[in-house]
Amino acid sequence: MIIIMQKDATQRQVNNVVARLQQMGCQAFCSEGTENTVIGINNHQHKLNQTVIENLPGVARLMPVSKPYKLASRDFHPADTTISIGNLTIGANHLTVIAGPCSVENKEQILTTAHAVKTAGAHILRGGAYKPRSSPYAFQGLGEAGLELLALAREETGLPIITEVLDPETVPLVRAYADILQIGARNMQNYSLLHAVGEAQHPVLLKRSMMATVDEFLMAAEYILSHGNQQVILCERGIRTYETSTRNTFDINAIPVLKEHTHLPIFADPSHATGKRSLVASIAKAAVAAGADGLAIEVHPNPDIALSDGAQSLTPPQFTELMRQVQKLAAALEKEA
Ligand code: PEP
Ligand code: MN
């Protein structure tokens, strides 16, 4: 259920509705629209006395939201959400590119990549310090030493940094270094981790699980939003299907579907979606054309010796060429890149 306030409702009237909802045992969230304030209720709807709320001063109407997610839905928040990181704005008419290696491997590797992607026009540097690997014998990341190298790369280039956090216990440490916390596909339904990043009040990029439907993806986002963190970016990174010619199947439909259902910024990761360097540029451009607000691309100075995901990593010259094309595409779509 959402409560739509009248256009001229005062802050006092909004506060009064929120207070009455809380007295009934409901949790209320306000969304300030351009036209009017909308109040969402995300729990204990059975406790709601609709008649009492309908008759409070300033209330225009109550509207049931049929979707299981409320705070993530466009009904609750019709305008696109934007997220600010320093001077950078993510969402609405901005196209944002995240680039960098799959894993932070050493100082030279991350600094070389950071400078190369910055020169090419990327906005955010990526790099895993804690890696969720299918094999326990594969490189697991440098841990905090990797976070320190990312911070050094940010200092040298001015690029904000994004890195994955694997468990609730490490959220405070990763938050202290990273501008955006990444939740990986394997952890999309790790509810204690979603709770922890929700409490962290820090931007989060949530990747779609390889097995999740769009509704399950949005419900995972709802966990973060319902803990009071509104700074959530969704990232389509391919799902698992019967097709074996690519690492995953990029669900291009998910981009306009998500844009219809949610106000959150939608990114695409063509690197994990394809698993193959030669396919990354095509899928990156397709995602932008389909309406993605951003891209996440793996780039490595020497992919042949990468400790993870070398086969899908672009070289710096390949990334530079892709950025040139993406910038043209953004201009054609009247987006700022
Ligand atoms: C990654 O971004 O390096 C990664 C592990 O991605 P995903 O969680 O989408 O597999
Ligand atoms: Mn990777």
Image (cartoon, helix red, strand yellow):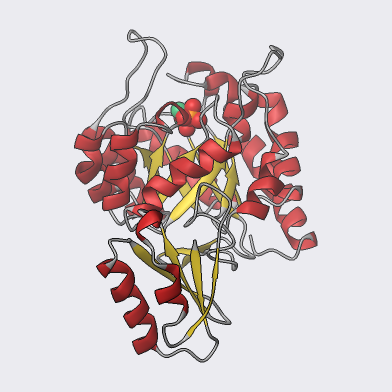
Identify the residue at image location x=66%, y=18%. Answer: 241
Q: Is residue 184 above or below residue 285?
A: above
The x and y percentages for residue 256 are 71, 48
Q: Is residue 242 above or below residue 10?
A: above
**Horizontal relation, residue 23 to residue 249: left or right:** left
Of 203 and 215, the residue lying toward us: 215
The x and y percentages for residue 7 are 55, 87
The x and y percentages for residue 167 are 27, 32
User: Does the rendering let one see residue 203?
Assistant: no
Q: Count the numbered circles shown.
A: 0
Identify the residue at image location x=56%, y=54%. Answer: 265
Identify the residue at image location x=30%, y=57%. Answer: 201
Task: State which quarter of the image contains the C terminus.
Answer: bottom right
The x and y percentages for residue 258 are 63, 48
Of 322 and 290, the residue lying toward us: 290
User: Within the image, what quadrant is residue 333 found in?
Assistant: bottom right
Of 277 and 274, the residue lying toward us: 274
Q: Is residue 166 above or below residue 290?
A: above
**Horizontal relation, residue 57 to residue 171: left or right:** right
**Horizontal relation, residue 42 to residue 328: left or right:** left
Identify the residue at image location x=59%, y=68%. Answer: 79
User: Does the rendering let one see residue 239?
Assistant: yes
